[in-house]
Image (cartoon, helix red, strand yellow):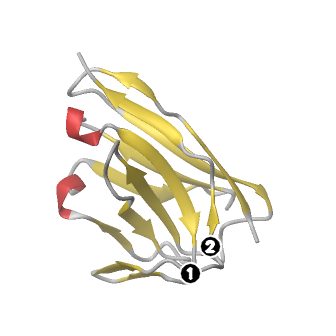
Amino acid sequence: QVQLVESGGGLVQPGGSLRLSCTASSGTLDYYAVGWFRQAPGKAREVVSCISASAGSTNYVESVKGRFTISRASDKKVVYLEMKNLTPEDTAVYFCATDPGLMCTAGNLHYSRTQFGSWGQGTQVTISS
């Protein structure tokens, strides 16, 4: 299994931007669909975006469409989540993961957790004035 490390979180004001990184500390990510997830206090973890293994497909949940952009680095070891126009509702711990239960195809984002997923430790994103 690939080992994942998230970074780039922090405290920003509403309307601000952050870029999160998901780095494979061992191996590469090019054979995996990768998802970005978030978990706010008292809420269930939710998938917010995914990118297919070929990077041919990207998907977003409605609440982040037009504000978040997922992409892969050319070195095949990093997946980014560029976040703009952040609001307090975006405050959460953000995780990246690979999991056979992550379906990321054209126009289709679906996740069903399996025991074979690899998760990072998460990075805190706080949006507050």
- Is residue 67 shown left or right of residue 23? left
Q: Are marks 2 and 1 in contact (CB under 8 Å)?
A: yes
**Residue at left 18%, top 55%?**
63
Question: Which amino acid, by three-letter code, is at mark 2?
Answer: Gly
Q: CA distance from mark 2 to mark 1?
A: 6 Å
**Residue at left 33%, top 83%?**
106
| Residue 87 appears in the rendering | no
Is 114 drawn above or below residue 118 in the view shown? below
Extreme front residue here?
Answer: 42
Is 52 drawn above or below residue 24 in the view shown? below
- Is residue 71 shown left or right of residue 29? left
Comparing 56 with 89, the one in front is 89
Question: Which amino acid, by three-letter code, is at mark 1?
Answer: Thr
| Residue 106 appears in the rendering | yes
Image quadrant where residue 83 sits? top left
Could you tell me residue 111's position as x and y percent? Answer: 41, 77
**Residue at left 41%, top 34%?**
125
Label of residue 114 in the image: 1
Image quadrant where residue 44 sits? bottom left
Residue named by callout 2: 117
Could you tell me residue 77's position as x and y percent? Answer: 69, 57
